[in-house]
Each structure stands twice: as structure tokens, then as C-alpha cells.
Image: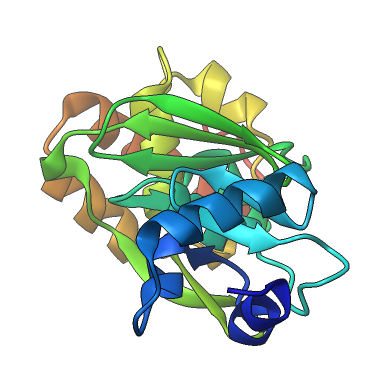
Amino acid sequence: MKYSELIEMTARLPLFRGSLLLAGDQDPADIRRQLSRWKASGKVIQLRRNLYTLAAPYRSVEPHPFLIANELLGPSYVSLESALAYYGLIPEAVPVTTSVTTGRTCSFDTPFGRFAFRHVTSSAFFGYHRIPVAAGQDALVARAPKALLDLVYLTAKGDCPDFLEALRLEDLESLSTIELFEFANRWGKGKVMRAAERLIAMMESQDSGGDWS
């Protein structure tokens, strides 16, 4: 395969897998050798085994960090601080793209930044949806209340008023209290239920201007 053929196949794809190049009568060993050469020359960027993108001068689509996160490790969905920042619930920019997974806790350093994955049990792997994050790119992202509860659950003393206050949550009125309690009840953990109750108190206090703690 020539590099011009690779560009023709993948330039409009934010990411691609090596298996895509094996269509037709391509020799797998030859494709592996070519990919190695293109990586060495900087024409192809490898994010992890079997996951690639073209180098910037050659790709016409920039991969969104949330799509990269989904593709780096599955099953997973973007959650925690990254999802909260995406929804405008926390004021800080988030330098690491954070996700939860039923796999092991791990992280990846890539040319597109750092991607961190936190483990949750399969019973806690819910409350996410597929949403458009860029033109032609969809990603699995936690619903806002679930992203908040994920963070609570995975943080030591995450249900404590001091921690919830330190998040400096904004735009709380956009949170669905129905989903918040639905997700907390489905989780069935005391820590998560306490956090949900305190978050509801925060929302009510924000509306009334009172002290929620």
C-alpha cells in the first residue's frame, strides 16, 4: 500500500484501526511493515495498539478527546471532571480527559494529551449516553448527574459537605433531580445516596440563597 492510498482511505476519519487496511487482498505482514515505516517517519501517529490517526498535515478531521477516550479503552464512557466541565458544572479547565471503565484503572499519554480511566463495577456502569461532540463524531459521555455521582463515589469522603463545596458547582439548576435520585437509588450505596441528598439541598439553597450544609 502506498501512503497516498492510506490518505485516500483515512483522511476523513478522526481515527482508524489497522484492521481497516486489510480489506481486499492486502498482506497483513506488509501492512504492519508499512505502518512501522510511516510511524517512524511521523506520517502516522499511533495512540495505542491498533489505533492510529494520520499526522496533522495529512488528516482533514481532528479527533475529539472524548472520541479518543472511548476508542483507547472499552468499555468506557467519559465522566468525572471531564464530563462536568463539558456540561459547565465546574469552572476549571480539565487538563486530563477522565473516564470510567469496567476494566482496570489505567492511563495513557498520547500526542493528544493524557487520558485517565477509573474502575467501577459492572453494576455501576450506567447513566451514560451517546452524544455528538464534534462534526461527524459521537462519544459515550455520562449524563450530568451520573458524572457527579461517579466523582463522589471514586473520591475518598466524596459525600462530605467540604468536598461538594470545594467543587464550586455552577449551573446546578440544569441538573435533573429525578435522574440524580434515580441513579443514586440504582447504585444502592449509602455514600452515593448521602451525596445525592446533599446535592439536592445545595440546589434548593442556591435557589433560596440560604445555607445548605
Q: Is residue 178 above or below residue 80?
A: below
Q: How is the image coloured?
A: rainbow
Q: Position of residue 111 (x, y in %)?
A: 74, 42
Q: In this view, does 31 lie above or below 199?
A: below
Q: Name the residue: 73% across, 42% down.
A: 40
Residue 31 shown left or right of residue 86 in the figure: left
Residue 105 shown left or right of residue 192 in the figure: right
How many numbered marks appear?
0
Q: Where is residue 115 in the image (x, y as percent from the top left)?
A: 57, 38
Residue 43 shown left or right of residue 66 in the figure: right
Residue 146 visible to the viewer: yes
Residue 70 visible to the viewer: no
- Which quarter of the figure is the N terminus placed in? bottom right
Q: In this view, does 81 lie above or below 106?
A: below
Asked whether 194 or 208 is in front, the reply is: 194
Q: Position of residue 20 (x, y in %)?
A: 42, 73
Asked whether 162 or 34 is in front, the reply is: 34
Q: Name the residue: 77% across, 57% down.
A: 43
Give residue 100's quadrant in the image.
top left
Q: Which residue lies furthest to the top in this view?
A: 156
Q: Name the residue: 59% across, 57% down.
A: 34
Q: Position of residue 207 (x, y in %)?
A: 61, 56
